Structures are given as structure tokens and as C-alpha cells.
Image (cartoon, helix red, strand yellow):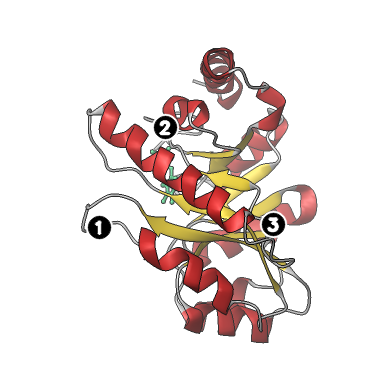
Amino acid sequence: MTVAENLAVIQDKIKKACELANRHAEDIRIIAVTKYVSIDRAKEALEAGIHHLGENRDEGFLAKYNEIGNNATWHFIGTLQSRKVKQIIEYVDYIHSLDRLSLAKEINKRANRTIKCFVQVKTSDEESKHGLMEEEVIEFVKQLEPYTNIEVVGLMTMAPYTNDEDKIRRCFQTLRELKERVQALHLPYAPCTELSMGMSNDFHIAIEEGATFVRVGSSLVGE
Ligand SMILES: *Cc1c(COP(=O)(O)O)cnc(C)c1O
């Protein structure tokens, strides 16, 4: 399947989820997660009209950035080791995995402009998922104030890999409620208007629950 063909299927699902939730499809941005695929396939995504590309490793990120450059908006979606920050910071537009103060400190130190960050939250009990616990998020966001190169644009989560839709939905609801609590703090550096949630198998549920960025890999560009 071409990326354009896959995209048409995904856009159709987005449209249906938006109808159910009374939302506008234009408010949902698709990040093509290209971590499994070649540079050519990433370029195909751009040609199909996707502007946002996501990578979860610094090597993959840099390999694609070197070819594509500023023709895309770049998202770093994976666990980020502090020592890798300096490699990507110049090129990245959004970091989806801010989950500790030591990382905030490093981003702040290495960046020479404001970096749009999502605070990653662990909304499920799956061991393999990273992020802050729900009850830690408010305090964490408050502690980011000194790091003036960081803007908290929103929250990010990964739902567990399961067929239990209610379980997935509850994770996304938790994230939306938390987002509203952060917004209510009215911190100038944390507008927190965005929700990065939903992947190939659950983006339709995420959209029903308020996602503004969905991160879609295998069903869009392939595995
Ligand atoms: C790989 C990955 C995705 C995309 O997953 P698919 O199931 O292939 O759509 C989304 N978000 C993160 C953080 C990822 O690592």
C-alpha cells in the first residue's frame, strides 16, 4: 500500500471519530512515525501531504533530518537520554517525552530557543511504559518554571497494548483531565493546550477523548 492509500483510510477513521465526538478533523494533526521505515518512505509521507514526522531514536532522527531538513516539522517521541539531547536539539520542533527534571535541565541548557515539549504521563500500569505518575504531574510542571527554553504545550501518553477498549479509553480520559488541571494553573510557560495520544490501533479512541496530535506508524507508513 502507498502512504497516500493508507492515509485515506486513516483520514476516514479520523472523520468518523470526529463526528462521534463533535470535533473538527482539521484540529487533529497526524504525526507519521517513521521509526521503522526508510528515508524514501518518510519522503513519501511528505508527498502525501503529511507535515509532521516522528522518530524515537537519535540515529533515526538525524538520518532522516539530514535528508529532509526543514521540509517537515520534527517530533521526538521516544525516551530521551539526557546525553543525547545535544545531538537533536537544534533540529527538533517538539519533544514528546519530557518526564524528569534532569532532562528539562539539559534541554534548557542546550537549546537556544524555546522548545515545545509534552510532559509524558504513565496512565497505565504497563511496566514498559514510561512517564510521570498522574499524581506527580502538577508538581512537575510547576518545577519547570526556571527552565525558560521549555514550553509545555501539552501532555503525552501511550495506552496499554490491549483489546480492552475501556481500559484504553480510561488512559486517554485521565490525560485529558490532567491537561485541564495544568491549564487551570495559568502558567505562562505551560499553556498545555495539546494532547499527544493515539497510535495505529487506538487513535480513533484517542480522538474521541480529545487528542490533538496522533502518532501513527505501522498503519500509515508501514512496519
Ligand atoms: C512507535 C510509536 C508510535 C507509533 O506506533 P504504531 O503502533 O506503529 O502506530 C507512537 N508513539 C510512540 C511513542 C512510538 O514509540
Q: Amino acid at mark 2?
A: Ser
Q: Which residue is mark 1?
A: 128
The amino acid type of the residue labelled 1 equals Ser
Local crowd at mark 1 within 10 Å, few (<14), some, or many (≥20)?
few
Helix, strand or loop at disc 2? loop
- Residue that numbered label 2 is attached to: 200
Q: Position of residue 90 (x, y in %)?
A: 71, 72
First in residue order: circle 3 vs circle 2: 3
Dot 2, how many residues are within 10 Å of its Cα: few (below 14), some (14-19), or many (20+)? some
The mark that comes first in sequence, 2 or 1, is 1
Q: CA distance from mark 3 to mark 2?
A: 27 Å
Dot label at residue 164:
none
Compared across the picture, whether 168 is left or right of 215 comes to: left
- In the rendered image, which residue does mark 3 sit on? 191
Secondary structure beneath dot 3 equals: loop
Quadrant hosting ligand 1: top left
Percent position (x, y) of residue 170?
34, 37
Q: Is residue 140 visible?
A: yes
Element type at marker 1?
A: loop
Q: Is mark 2 within 8 Å of ligand 1?
A: yes
